[in-house]
């Protein structure tokens, strides 16, 4: 859906979505409670599609190079999938406004694995915000992960 890739969710409207999909407005509400519900559905599809070719490092056993490859692969797959604009809007504008999923971050994660996840996600967000600085962002991630994983 083009609408979610061109503007923040707070500015999105149903009219362009139903026009693009060539459906009646009532059909939209038959399947979705509201724009947020539709957004979460589309974003979920995008994430599944992007992650198809990305193998996550084993929890607790990942190497720095594994995490760097994961970030690079996610960014590359985002571009190749056609979902990059949606991912960009999500990370830069929508992420903080979407209700969290239950157990989005399992509490049984070790503090180290939780920290790696936060660092990886933050690096992806920064690379999307400033793509020209991607190499520097990845170098910084590598330096921090090298120290963190050595513990």
Image (cartoon, rainbow, N blue to C red):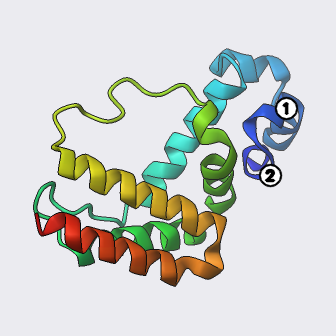
Q: Secondary structure at mark 1?
A: loop
In percent of width and height, residue 1 lies at 72, 46
- Front residue (pair 7, 118): 118
In percent of width and height, residue 78 lies at 55, 65
Task: Report whether 78 appears left or right of 48.
Answer: right
Identify the residue shown where x is 36% and y is 66%: 53
Identify the residue shown where x is 25% and y is 78%: 65
Compared to residue 107, the image places residue 133 above or below, namely: below
> Residue 125, labelled with which disc?
none
Q: Quadrant of the C terminus?
A: bottom left
Identify the residue shown where x is 48% and y is 50%: 47
Reading the chain from its start, which is encountered first: label 2 or label 1? 2
In percent of width and height, residue 38 lies at 65, 30
In percent of width and height, residue 104 lies at 36, 33
Identify the residue shown where x is 59% and y is 30%: 98
Compared to residue 20, the image places residue 100 above or below, namely: above
Q: CA distance from mark 2 to mark 1?
A: 11 Å
- Give the residue pinned by disc 2: 6
């Amino acid at each position: 859906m083009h609408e979610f890739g061109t503007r923040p969710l707070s500015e999105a409207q149903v009219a362009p979505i139903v026009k693009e999909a060539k459906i009646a407005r009532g059909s939209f509400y038959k399947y979705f409670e509201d724009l947020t519900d539709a957004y979460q559905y589309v974003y979920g599809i995008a994430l599944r599609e992007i992650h198809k070719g990305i193998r996550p490092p084993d929890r607790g056993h990942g190497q720095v190079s594994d995490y760097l490859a994961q970030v690079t692969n996610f960014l590359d797959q985002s571009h190749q999938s056609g979902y990059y604009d949606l991912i960009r809007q999500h990370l830069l504008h929508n992420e903080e406004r979407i209700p969290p999923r239950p157990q989005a971050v399992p509490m049984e994660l070790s503090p180290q694995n939780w920290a790696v996840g936060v660092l990886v996600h933050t690096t992806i967000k920064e690379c999307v915000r400033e793509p020209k600085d991607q190499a520097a962002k990845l170098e910084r991630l590598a330096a921090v992960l090298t120290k963190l994983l050595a513990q």
